[in-house]
Image (spheres, rainbow, N blue to C red):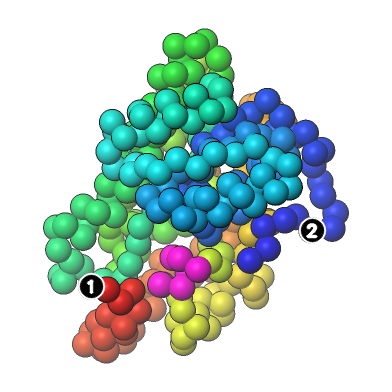
Amino acid sequence: MKAEATLFDPFRRDLLAGKTTIITGGGSGLGRSMALRFAGLGAKVAVLGRRPEPLGETVEAIRSTGGTAVGIPCDVRDPEWVRRAFDEVESHLGPANQIVNNAAGNFLSATEDLSPNAFNAVVQIVLFGTFHCTTELGRRLIARGTGGEVLAITTTYAVTGSAFVIPSASAKAGVRALIKGLAVEWATYGIRLNAIAPGPFPTDGAFRRLLPGSAMEAQALARIPARRFGEHWELTNLAAYLMSDASPYQTGDEVTLDGAEALFSGQQFAALAHLPRPEAKELMTSLRPKK
């Protein structure tokens, strides 16, 4: 998966110099791509996640090109673990002044079949994790009297809701509200908070679980007026801009990046409602990761 920009790079190579950025879910997918891009623009980067191996691979990729990075295992559902992870990040890289809330969980399920534990798992990662990490950084920035930046990766269906991904839609809607509320509350401290709501961007994680080389993938592509999926460099460029000093007046914003998909299609997984319910359930079950 390409993480670099196109041959025309719109940014100075020191765009993020002086930034120390924490990226949750930074070992793979869009998190990894953002980590590589931010480091290439001068940021010191800490990647957090539950699996050490992909964190180590991302850190090695950054260091191999002269960047500065550290990988710290962390479960964002646990606020005490988050606090310890931030302490460790700062012991290696110095005071953190940015975070990208990228860690997420999602799967397809008919809601009548959804267990309380399954609902809780997604909401704990997405909404609680974003709250824990954002407030941990915010308290440190406020205590130091320095500004900083917070970015959350949301989703276009956080506005409309979406059938068959109720935990994710509910949690992302909460994240969207959190970002907008704190943008007002923390503006006095010089802390900016924004969000990116991406459409489909191919990854080896969520994309493969939700739209894996099937008729659903073809349907998803057909809903995008731009007639293609997003490329990682397009999202990482937008993220870098929002986290840079080039956007000092932009806060409380959610930028949609989806080739006009949301405007065209509304709810992303609503097409499953057109199938007979037993067939829809069979399809969703077949797409879940094998234990």
Quadrant of the image containing the N terminus = bottom right
Query: Where is residue 20 drawn, in percent x and y?
Result: 59, 30
Label 1, secondary structure: give it: loop
Q: Is residue 137 above or below residue 214?
A: above
| Residue that appears at 27% across and 38% down | 78
- Residue 278 appearing in the image: yes
Q: Is residue 10 magenta?
A: no
Q: Is residue 31 above or below residue 240?
A: below
Query: Where is residue 90 drawn, in percent x and y?
Result: 50, 25
Question: What kind of secondary structure does the magenta stretch mostly adopt?
Answer: helix
In this rendering, the label closer to the viewer, 1 or 2: 2
Q: Residue furthest right?
A: 8
| Amino acid of disc 2 | Thr
Q: Which mark is residue 102?
A: none
| Residue that appears at 75% across and 55% down | 5
Query: Where is residue 275 drawn, in percent x and y?
Result: 31, 87
Quadrant of the image containing the C terminus = bottom left
Residue position for label 1: 110
Q: Which mark is residue 6?
A: 2
Q: CA distance from mark 1 to mark 2?
A: 40 Å
| Amino acid of disc 1 | Ala
Q: Is residue 206 magenta?
A: yes
Query: Where is residue 192 drawn, in percent x and y?
Result: 54, 28
Q: Which residues are magenta?
A: 204-210
- Labels 1 and 2: the sequence-earlier one: 2
Residue nearest the viewer, comparing 18 with 54: 54
Q: Is residue 170 above or below residue 80?
A: below
